[in-house]
Image (tube, rainbow, N blue to C red):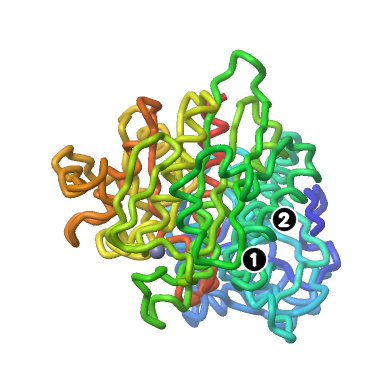
Amino acid sequence: MKFEISNNSPLEIETNWLVVGIFEEAEFSESLQELDEKLEGSLSRVQERKDLTGKLGELTILADVPQLSAERVIVVGLGKHDKLTIGSLSKAYTTAFRHLATKENQSLVIMVPEGASSALGEGHSIERLVDVATVACSRQNIYSTEQDRYEFENVLLCGVSDFEVNQNALEKGLILGEAVNLTRELVNRHPDDLYPETFAQRAADEAADIHLQGEIFDQDMLEDEKMGALLAVSRGSDRPPRMVVLKYNGGGKNAPTIGLVGKGVTFDSGGLSLKTSAGMITMKSDMGGAATVLGAITAIAKLKLKVNVIGVMGLVENMTGGSAYKLGSVLTSRSGKTIEIHNTDAEGRLVLADALAYAVDQKVDKLIDLATLTGACVVALGEDIVGAFTNDQEWCDELKTASQKVNEEVWQLPMHDFFAEQLKSEFADCKNIGSRWGGATTAAKFLEQFVDDVPWVHLDIAGPSYAESSSAHRDSGGTGVMVRALVQLAADSC
Ligand SMILES: [Zn+2]
């Protein structure tokens, strides 16, 4: 999609849509006054009739504006000026872009709201506008014969002061939007389309496009690497497992290396601890962690951030075939630790145990893992907040700060040692599941055993990575949550 910054007057440019923002309970800004004058006061008349209030996400369309070069005007409610954040800006414009993207070949001229740069920092509003426009245009119904969303033909952004800063922001916004879309697309792909081999191939293609080094581990190589826990999960499936490792060295020899590890269960039936139909219907999305790692590392590489990152994606399908791992089975993980299986639906942590141990062996300095890991985390925090767990408060604080900057909601949950007592086994070093209570934390305590003393944050994205239903500003399906936060964290680590 084509985005450009323009110094021309937005009122003089021929376009399908002139997009203007308006704050709630505020006087018209200078550019809105100019627009109102040109429209012979129709904007203020609509406002007087209370059809235009500026409430966050409100859309008002003026469809007949012969006084302008634009065919139509869409006025986007931005909420109260003093409440403007990256989050409210995203909500407002995503609502508008989703509406405009339902028609083919639309061109847009966006009057960047006055005061946005001073409130959010120069460049930040442009970056986010381009980002959310890119996301809003990309359709989720990828298998539907009827397309419901179209890319804009071109988008001109008017009303910015510092061209260079905003040009860079524009390029960054496009990279971020595309990375979020990559993650969303993979999450949305159905399990007979996206499985370990095809995910790995896609990762290889994405990496090749940007000259990212990498390696794909097949069954034999995983056996050589002694990934006994990951391999056990995949045994009940006809689809062989894969592990993708991508390496980005933007920081040079002396810069620290961040390990990003993702759970990639491309379909989770629960194994012999079989899920119900209702519990299984969205389980194509159980690879959201791996998809987030892929989205983030491609964006980090495209942005040429001065940091080193290793992305590790553990890819398996959890099925019930005759060779499936069983309740009571004891697995030997890569680290040598033995694990007694008490529930085959607690499989993500087994995949992560080996993938984390592999990352530790690569001498990463810091670790983040992402996984659609527990229903318990969704019970605790709801569908929109990511749960964070850590063995290193400083590293976790860095992650939380980065997330806040890009408006991703993260909440830290406890890691008291007594939770680990639930994982004691009579027959092996540990069990793979504790009791019903505190299930998100016991899962994290399980993972903690495999990260040695590397500073580590575990992010449980079971709720936020997949939206069950659409709202005005978000499509149902894959969301791409935490892609932006990981990129921000990498940028902050430079
Ligand atoms: Zn499971």
User: Measured along the vertical axis of the image, is residue 278 above or below residue 186?
Assistant: below
Quadrant of the image for the C terminus?
Answer: top right
Residue 88 on image: x %, y % = 47, 58
Q: Quadrant of residue 130?
A: bottom right
Residue 3 on image: x %, y % = 78, 54
- Report helix, strand or loop for mark 1: loop
Closer-to-camera residue (2/372): 372
Q: On the rendering, which quadrant does ligand 1 occupy?
A: bottom left
Residue 66 on image: x %, y % = 80, 79
For the point 77% across and 67% down, which residue is it? 152
Mark 1: give few (<14), some (14-19) or many (20+) Cα within 10 Å. many
Q: Which residue has dot 1 on it?
A: 194
Closer-to-camera residue (323/199): 323
Query: N-terminal of the two: label 2 or label 1?
Result: 1
Cα distance between the residues tagged 2 and 1? 9 Å
User: Measured along the vertical axis of the image, is residue 463 above or below residue 453?
Assistant: below
For the point 60% across and 13% down, which residue is it? 254
Q: Are marks 2 and 1 in contact (CB under 8 Å)?
A: yes
Query: Is residue 34 found left or right of 407 in the rendered image?
Result: right
Marker count (numbered): 2
Query: Is residue 105 found left or right of 44 in the rendered image?
Result: right
Q: Which residue has dot 2 on it?
A: 202
The amino acid type found where label 1 is placed reads: Leu
Quadrant of the image for the N terminus?
Answer: bottom right
Closer-to-camera residue (141/127): 141
For the point 36% across and 28% down, which residue is it? 452
Closer-to-camera residue (292/10): 292
- Report helix, strand or loop for mark 2: helix
Identify the residue at the far top of this view: 254
The amino acid type found where label 2 is placed reads: Arg
